[in-house]
Amino acid sequence: MKLSVVLAVYNAEGTLGEQLAALARQTWDEPWELIVVNNASKDQTKAIAESFYSKIPTLKIIDASQRKGAAYARNQGVEVAQAKMIAFCDADDVVRDNWVAEIAAAIEQNGFVCGPMSVSALNPEWRVQEPVSVRVGEELFHASDLFEHQFPPFPEDGFFKTGASCNMGVLKSIHQDIGGFDEDFLRDQDRDYCIRAQLKGYRLYFAPRAIVEYRYKLSLRDTFSQFRGWGKWLMLIPRKYAPPTSLRKKISYVFGGWWPVPLELMKIRSRAGLFAFTAGFAHRLGQSQGCIEFMVLPDIKSWFATRFGKSTQVEGVANQDP
């Protein structure tokens, strides 16, 4: 087996069939397998996956219901993977017909890669306007995804590149060396994964021809939930990697940065603008929530323990709500 594609799924009955059909159309000449990892779905996700046994002969469906989260599910998929190269994609997106061949070639050449996400095919035109997309030629891509952008490091002495696990490829040996995805993260585990890989000395490369069609959320409620979750779990990054800072600074971060909100609200002129505002507001709210839960409260517990001479143990974060 040359490549193992790991697809973590949870309650994905509305979109999974389209993604599996795209994977069934792949025409790569080398042997590869698809591992669908069911993370305790409560809908028809498993039945839909099982209906593709005849169309994808190397399809495996495994149960990963023991723990919540895509990080856990992906790690379980890699555990059973037979190939030395691993590719990750998501149930609500659609890989292009040459995706398997392109991402496999990129992994073989570079070891650790992420590809771009086109937003043209799966989203209405209004949803890909405003600051969420970038035009390259005739095609629109996710704005953060041309991805030679850089992410502030911890400590502040360089930059880390980050990519999305919905279009990621890695040698299994690298995945194992860095300890897989951190299962404490219910969101933003791919950002942490990229940082840890680079701290271990592995460079992250861009695979421009391994393209995934990316699907945006089309309701304000789902958009709010998604971006709030991303903002919240992002705050585990400074908890893990940032130099120590004072409780006062952490609290000031929780309440600071809100002054532009009324101005941004008044600038809304379109449905796309409303979605962009909702995403930004939810992300900032999630960051405040995450800062409180992951940094402020542990500091307060430690302060009480020191002040009153009692030992205390900060609870883990793996089972908190996304």
Image (cartoon, rainbow, N blue to C red):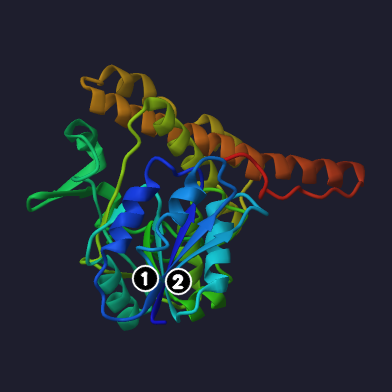
Residue at x-position 26% and y-position 48%: 142
The residues bearing labels 2 and 1 have C-alpha atoms spaced at a distance of: 7 Å
Q: Quadrant of the C terminus?
A: top right
- Residue 195 is labelled as none
**Which residue is at the far left?**
137
**Which residue is at the far right?**
309
**Picture layout, residue 53 above or below residue 130:** below
Assess whether mark 1 and mark 2 are in contact (beta carbons under 8 angstroms): yes
**Picture layout, residue 9 above or below residue 3:** above
Q: Which residue is mark 2?
A: 198
Residue at x-position 35% and y-position 80%: 31
Compare residues 322 and 78 and report the one nearer the observer. 78
In the rendered image, residue 235, in percent from the top left (x then y), is placed at: 54, 46
Q: Earlier in the sequence, mark 2 or mark 1?
A: 2
**Mark 1 crowd level (few <14, some 14–19, many ≥20, 10 Å Cα):** many
In the rendered image, residue 30, in percent from the top left (x then y), is placed at: 31, 81
Q: Which residue type does callout 1 highlight?
A: Leu
Say whether residue 195 is visible.
yes
Q: Which residue is mark 1?
A: 204
Say whether residue 241 is visible.
no
Quadrant of the rendered structure where residue 63 is? bottom right
Dot 2 falls on a residue whose secondary structure is helix
